[in-house]
Image (spheres, rainbow, N blue to C red):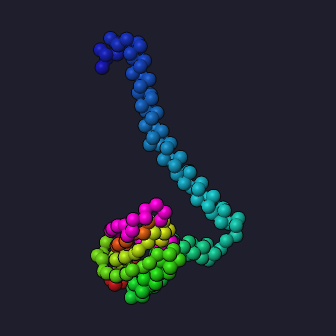
């Protein structure tokens, strides 16, 4: 080491010394300063949240009620009006809603055939084989309204074939869809 120090050019020695200082500074910032800064930001965010709750004067009960309403809203967004229905009533509810949506969008609902799907993680699939006769534009409106009415429904399979040759305005289509509804399994049911 002494030979290196004696034979090293002052410029090389200065560069090595600067590199060591920069490396030590980077390690110090990374392992000492940065975690403290992150901790400070997290504590500051918590403080602002608590300060805001204290200023607004909301009690814990009011906050819990608000959070419970948000959970119900998200559950409704996921399941639609089916969220609170027993499993046995869900099929008739879905069929009734499909009929209502079909009437409102001027689509002929030819048939709906419920079926059992498989279990995917914590969710049970319920399949609905739906046959429609619809105009092209009405069908897309139907899909949109079904999504709003029933919540999270997946189109698993579909077949679309033309019914007539009038393709200019709003062609009539024969449509077969497999709609899948997912419901969380509760108590092993």
In which image quadrant can residue 8 be found? top left
Q: Residue at x 34, y 16 (%)?
A: 5
Q: Residue at x 59, y 56 (%)?
A: 45
Residue stretch in magenta = 143-170
Q: Residue at x 34, y 82 (%)?
A: 113
Task: Determine whether 167 is above or below 71 in the image.
Answer: above
59 sits to left or right of 164: right
Q: x%, y% of residue 54?
A: 68, 66
Q: Residue at x 47, y 65 (%)?
A: 170
Q: Quadrant of the C terminus?
A: bottom left
Which one is nearer the viewer's eye here, 9 or 112?
112
Which one is nearer the viewer's eye here, 183 or 151?
151
Residue 44 seen in render: yes
In which image quadrant can residue 26 be found? top left
Q: Is residue 165 magenta?
A: yes
Which one is nearer the viewer's eye here, 139 or 143?
139
Q: x%, y% of residue 139?
A: 45, 69
62 sits to left or right of 17: right
């Amino acid at each position: 080491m002494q030979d290196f120090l004696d034979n090293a050019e002052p410029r090389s020695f200065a560069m090595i010394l600067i590199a060591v200082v920069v490396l030590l500074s980077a390690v110090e910032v990374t392992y000492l300063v940065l975690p403290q800064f992150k901790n400070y930001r997290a504590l500051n965010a918590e403080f602002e949240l608590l300060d805001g709750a204290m200023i607004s004067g909301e009690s814990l009960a009011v906050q819990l009620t608000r959070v419970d309403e948000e959970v119900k809203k998200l559950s409704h967004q996921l399941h639609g009006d089916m969220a609170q229905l027993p499993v046995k009533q869900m099929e008739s509810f879905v069929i009734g809603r499909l009929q209502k949506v079909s009437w409102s969008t001027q689509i002929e609902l030819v048939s709906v055939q419920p079926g059992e799907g498989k279990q995917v993680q914590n969710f049970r699939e319920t399949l609905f084989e739906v046959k429609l006769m619809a105009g092209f534009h009405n069908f897309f409106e139907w899909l949109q309204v079904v999504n709003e009415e029933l919540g999270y429904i997946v189109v698993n399979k579909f077949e679309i074939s033309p019914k007539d040759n009038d393709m200019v305005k709003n062609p009539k289509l024969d449509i077969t869809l497999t709609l899948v509804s997912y419901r969380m399994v509760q108590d092993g049911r």
